[in-house]
Image (cartoon, rainbow, N blue to C red):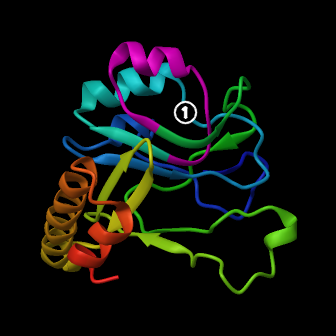
Amino acid sequence: MVLASSTDAPKLTGGHFVDQAKDGHVVVIDAPREAKSAVWGGLMSAGAIAQGATGVVISGNCRDVGEHRELGFPVYSRTHSTVGQSPFTRPSEVNIPLTIQPQYPEHLANSDSLFPAVTVNPGDWVLADEDGVVCVPKDLEEKVIELAQKGRAVDDLCMRDIKAGKGVQASFKLHRGK
């Protein structure tokens, strides 16, 4: 997405951007940081469902949260807005790499501990739940699955022991080595 006033950005071709969603894909949108409008609403979710998309992740605002829930379509966004997309922003390109910049409050802007930008390429895995969103590059898919399975197994052992009253510290030391 770009600001509607942008004359530098390409113009989208090939119809509405939601109609270009692919079966089984997650739509990833990077809205301009200064955009106050929502770039996704209930009608977009209905259109994405019709195209076979499985969800949307938005670095920006969405609206119509109740409609997304009613449709059963997962929408993850940084924030919400009641203001619609048009005439404030417009899609520029689809199916291209996106580099999503982290967004921090002013007082953290120069911190050494900030997360780096994340580049999402077409074909990467984008996974989201109530805890957050991650992008797994396609060339790291097998390694990430292996690490995730190992981590889940260790956490299951820790949970079992903690529930049995063995304590968090003792369980972590036994299963995590720390």
The amino acid type of the residue labelled 1 equals Trp
Q: Is residue 61 magenta?
A: yes
At x 44% / y 21%, what residue is drawn?
68
Residue at the extreme right: 107
Residue at the extreme front: 165
Against 171, residue 176 (above or below) is below
Q: Quadrant of residue 145?
A: bottom left
Q: Is residue 39 magenta?
A: no
SS at mark 1?
loop
Which of 97/10 is in front? 97
Q: Quadrant of residue 74?
A: top left
The segment highlighted magenta reads: 58-75
Residue at the extreme bottom: 112
In the rendering, at what x and y percent does residue 73 appear?
Answer: 35, 27
Against 58, residue 149 (above or below) is below
At x 34% / y 38%, what residue is drawn?
55
Q: Tell me the residue that label 1 is attached to.
A: 40
In the rendering, at what x and y percent does residue 110 appear?
Answer: 81, 81
Instruction: Tell me the crowding category of disc 1: few under 14, some 14 to 19, or many 20 or more residues within 10 angstroms, Cα based.
Output: many
Q: How many marks?
A: 1
In the picture provided, is 92 more to the left or to the right than 13? right
In the picture provided, is 158 more to the left or to the right than 128? left
At x 45% / y 48%, what residue is drawn?
131
At x 19% / y 43%, what residue is drawn?
24
